Image (cartoon, grey):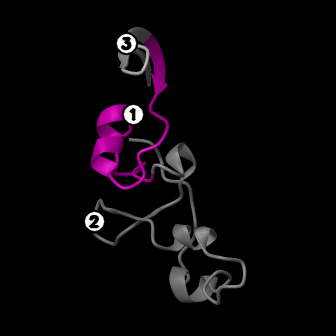
């Protein structure tokens, strides 16, 4: 998202056009959805992973389960980083089909 904004420079008492870009919204996912148009709910709800996400569906539910996928963001030395068995509980990882 970029735009031109008419700006007033007080020191020179002049106006100029400033080219501005909104690059990141870190702390507010609702605002991220409004500015980027990316859905933050459902199957592709992770704004970092986007379309390359893997998720589980909870049994007897249509809710996507992303918990195990986020281990990749832990530090390499973290004890949970490679502990796949405790998190997947013998589930098969698969890509979630698009609706």
Residue 88 in the image: above or below residue 28: below
The residue under the point 46% across, 72% down is: 67
Which-is-in-front pick, marks 3 and 1? 3
The residue under the point 68% across, 82% down is: 82
The residue under the point 49% across, 36% down is: 23
Q: Is residue 89 in view?
A: no
* Percent coordinates x, y for residue 64 in the rendering: 37, 61
Q: Is residue 52 in view?
A: yes
Spatial distance from mark 3 to mark 1, Cα to Cα?
Answer: 35 Å
- Judged from this view, the residue extending furthest toward the right is 76
* Percent coordinates x, y for residue 76 in the rendering: 72, 78
Labelled disc at residue 61: 2
Q: Earlier in the sequence, mark 2 or mark 3?
A: 3
Towards the viewer: 46 or 5:
5
**Which portion, as a residue range, is magenta?**
17-46
Q: Which residue is mark 1?
A: 36
- Quarter holding the C terminus is top left
Which-is-in-front pick, marks 2 and 3? 3
Q: Which residue is mark 3?
A: 13
């Amino acid at each position: 998202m970029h735009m031109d904004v008419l700006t007033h420079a007080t020191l020179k008492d002049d106006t100029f056009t400033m080219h501005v870009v909104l690059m990141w919204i870190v702390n507010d996912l609702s605002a991220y959805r409004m500015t980027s148009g990316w859905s933050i709910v459902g199957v592709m709800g992770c704004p970092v992973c986007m379309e390359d996400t893997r998720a589980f569906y909870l049994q007897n539910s249509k809710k996507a389960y992303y918990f195990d996928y986020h281990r990749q963001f832990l530090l390499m030395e973290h004890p949970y980083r490679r502990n796949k068995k405790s998190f997947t509980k013998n589930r098969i990882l698969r890509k979630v089909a698009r609706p």
